[in-house]
Every structure is written in C-alpha cells, then in structure tokens.
Image (cartoon, rainbow, N blue to C red):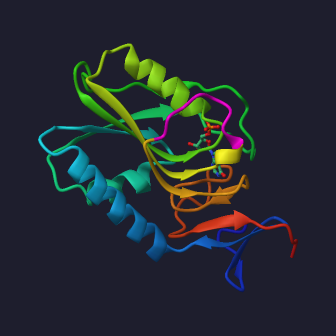
Amino acid sequence: MDELLTKKENAIYVGNEKFIPFISEEKIQLRIAQLGKQLTEDYKGKLPIFIGILNGSFLFLSDLIRNIELKCEVDFFKLSSYGDKKISSGNVKLLKELNADINDRHIVIVEDIVDTGLSINYIENLIRMNKPASIKVVTLLAKPKSIKYDVKIDYIGFEIPNEFVIGYGLDYAQKYRNLRSIYILSEGKN
Ligand code: IMP
C-alpha cells in the first residue's frame, strides 16, 4: 500500500487519476476570514449555534469559528458520505444526531461543499422540525451547475465548476482530507 501522498509537479495522483492544485491554502484562509467578518456583523447581539455536517466540514468549521468574534456554540450532524464514489448515491443516512436543543435558536449550518443540495435539504428539514429562531447556510464550496434541490445558500466561499475536488476536509474514499489546499480532478492522465 502506498502510504505517501504521491505528488509530482504539485499534482496528486490517485491511481491513474490526476488532481491538480485548484484553491491554495492562502486563498482559502483569506476567504474564511472574510466570511467570519461578515458572520460576526450579521450575528451581533445573538448567540448562534454553528452546526457542522461531518465529516467534510470539520476543517472549515474549525477555521471559520476562529474568525467569529462573538460568543457562539458548536454542534454536529453526521451524514453518510459518497463511499468510494465520486457521485452522490441520491440517498443520505443520518449517522449522528445533534446534542443541542435548537428550539428558538439561531442556526448556521456549515457545509464543506454543496453539490446536488440533497444533504443541505435533508438537514434543513430536520432542523426546521425543532422550530429554531432562524436558519442560514454557509458553505465553503458550491457547484451551482449541479444543484438539483431547492436550497438557499446564504454564504458561499467559492463557486466551482461541476468537477470532483479533494483536500481541506473533502475526501475521495475517506482519504486526502488532510491536504491543506484544494485539488481538482484534471482531464489529463499521468
Ligand atoms: P450533496 O448532498 O449532493 O449536495 O453533496 C454534499 C456532500 O457530498 C458533501 O458534504 C461532500 O461530502 C460530498 N461531495 C460533493 N461533491 C464533492 C467533491 O467534489 N469532493 C468530495 N466530496 C464531495
């Protein structure tokens, strides 16, 4: 088994699929600082709960809340992922419920990426049943051409093309989440 991340000319090779650098660590951090500033302004005087969708959002959520200059709380839902595939199965399974009581609370759902919108749609419906004071959605990445569900995304880090990406929390068969920047599947093979 190859335990090393195989890098050649800054590309990451997964078998014979080539992922090339797409969004640098610096760009990610700069954009998160902007989002944090915006959220700090928008939630002044409130005590929001940031709800991360595991696993993909764990890095984004941890960097985002360190850019929020307000008291806030954090909780998590866990959903099943795509497994070893690069496309959505069209099903979601809830693997972990929230612990917080969200009735009458201001909720900010934190996603790594909105692809079809299925996960956000599912989570929003679950949250709405508990009658929160408000719900907003922040995602680091969105693939606007891929969205199939009626979802409103309030804060978007980057709009990206309808291609598979890895790194900064995003996985391919559970791996590559630990890359500091985001890589995109390139047409060309090695
Ligand atoms: P959706 O439910 O189709 O919107 O997909 C959202 C979830 O699918 C994300 O939270 C990710 O876990 C996963 N996902 C979607 N696109 C990608 C991708 O390009 N790379 C890695 N994971 C992805």
30 over 105 or under it: above or below: below
37 over 94 or under it: above or below: below
Residue 63, how many percent across, how many down? 34, 60
Q: Nearer the viewer, residue 150 or 178?
A: 150
Which residue is outermost to the bottom? 9
128 over 178 or under it: above or below: above
Which residue is outermost to the right? 189
167 over 48 or under it: above or below: below
Magenta residues span 146-153
Majority SS type along the magenta span? loop
Residue at image point 44% right, 19% down:
126
Residue 171, how many percent across, how many down? 61, 53
The C terminus - image quarter: bottom right
Residue at image point 75% right, 42% down:
87
Q: Nearer the viewer, residue 175 or 71?
A: 71
Residue 74, how many percent across, how many down? 27, 40
